[in-house]
Image: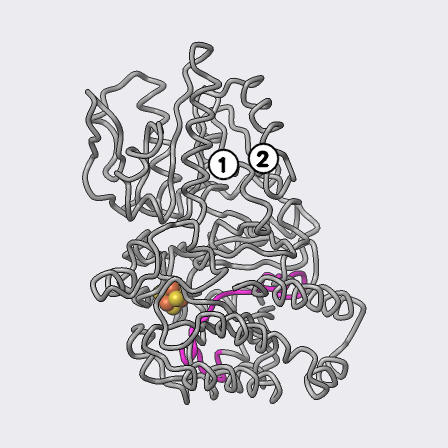
Amino acid sequence: MKVFICFPPLNCEKGFPTLGQNRQFQYFKEPTYIYPVVPALAASLLKKNGYSVKWIDCIAENISYDQFLEMIKEEKPDIIAMETKTPVIKQEWKIINDLKRISQGKWKLITVFFGDHVTALPEESFENCDVDFILTGGDYDFLLLNLCEVIKNKRPFSELEAGIFFREDNAIKNTGKFKLDHDLNSLPFIDRDLTKWWLYAYKNGNYRRTPGTYIMSGRDCWWGKCTFCSWPQLYPQFRVRKVENVLDEIEYLVNNYPIKEIMDDTGTFPCGEWLIKFCKGMISRGLNKKVNLDCNMRFGAVDYEGYKLMKKAGFRFLLFGLESANQRTLDRINKNLKVETIIESCRLARKAGLYPHITIMFGYPWESFEDAKKTLELGKWLLKKDYAYTMQATIVIPYPGTPLFEECRKKDLLYTLDWSDYDMKKPVMKLSFPPSLINKLVQEMYKVSFNPEFILRKIISIRDGADIKYFWRAFLKVLGHILDFKGA
Ligand code: SF4
């Protein structure tokens, strides 16, 4: 049985879409290619179980829509599975219908969706396109294998695992609420050649040194309660792989590929005893000398001693969600964070020699323009003080399935329910000030890169050619981001 895992071509006028682990979707003028870890695991798991699998990422491979359709017509896969996200779902409905049309009368093509949007609204896609199956929840790698086994062996749909939606007798049926009871340690390592690792090895702003790659130690975030975040609905419980299993994968990567930097894209990297054991393992295996590690972290989760150990273990870039400088907002989005902790945690991480990257968001409907400016000022201050090393500013978008979306819908705070507008090009939540000012705030934040004090600190911090290349890439990214938020 031939299974294709595809990222079809999407609207390029808006920029390059970022899917995968991008928990807040964005189109980028300057492309960033994130390794889609769970889809890549799905491909690897299927291959390990004897399926003929093809990985087609038209976005990263720059394949046009006509070329994509020609490829499908020629190769006639039995199953095409695609990841979806809210801002591109309407485009993907059309793609599913086109795929069904070109296969009609020629071969039997089964289409599958998975991802956060269809987990929140599975029925909607059945109503709007001819998709055959929807895998809900975040363990869609395991679910896709189960689905393929049932189809290949012509077994009844009663043998499908929980969380799968399908059509039967002109009705949409499902196997109940998805379960997260799969053992992550039983998964194979990602088959990097099958999933074309080189596509995701260079154009990514997180890497200082390239080629880089991605792994995930856990699914997905041990906090998992921020009301705007789209992934806790995929992974309402946190699970983590065994330390040895993750270390083995890192060792395999550095021994078999020229990988210099690895981003662990777990929503929040595991902390406590797990982190200590992991760091000690990196050091005792000598991996800290061979590769740099990047990860997502929460402010206040690690103390100074912990940061020092992480530094020694090879960690470099820690991505922190700052979200807002207003305590009222942090409480309201259930971030479980104090503003003072942001400053202190950033300072200590930097002091330990790590490179904190802060992400901030504008556009909360309850914030005044003055509140938003406070966030801008804190972000700028952290960068100028060199407590934060780099940053990313975005517009907060409430995705279906999140508590923030429900709150906005109940309180009539949404400008639109057209999912194509949920692409961060402009606010979709009603604001107390003109929406165009949001884009200006985001642009202002990026313009800190032109501040003489900031530039001087960066020049002083240059250690080698890799730093120069990194800053040049970062500079191009900043210009790209200023353009990303140009039009309101
Ligand atoms: S800390 Fe909050 S925003 Fe970050 S991954 Fe966890 S739930 Fe999502």
**Extreme-front residue of the structure:** 434
Residue 322: name its quadrant: bottom left
Q: Quadrant of residue 23?
A: bottom left
Is the residue under label 1 in contact with that under label 2 (CB below 8 Å)? yes
- Residue 215 image point, x, y percent: 52, 53
Mark 2 secondary-structure assignment? loop
Between 393 and 483, the one lying in front of the other is: 483
Q: Amino acid at mark 1?
A: Ser
The magenta stretch is 285-306
* Amino acid type of the residue tagged 2 in the rendering: Leu
- Please identify the quarter of the rendering in which residue 372 is found: bottom left
In magenta segment, residue 300: yes
Q: Against 358, is 8 above or below? A: above
Q: CA distance from mark 2 to mark 1?
A: 7 Å
Label located before the other in sequence (2 or 1): 1
The residue at 68%/58% (across/down) is 260
Disc assigned to residue 44? 1
Q: Could you tell me if residue 185 is visible in this image?
A: yes
Tell me: is circle 2 under 8 Å from ligand 1. no
Q: Residue at x 45, y 68 (%)?
A: 275
For label 1, the SS is: helix
Residue 244, visible in the rendered structure: no
The answer to which of 6 and 242 lies nearer the viewer is: 6
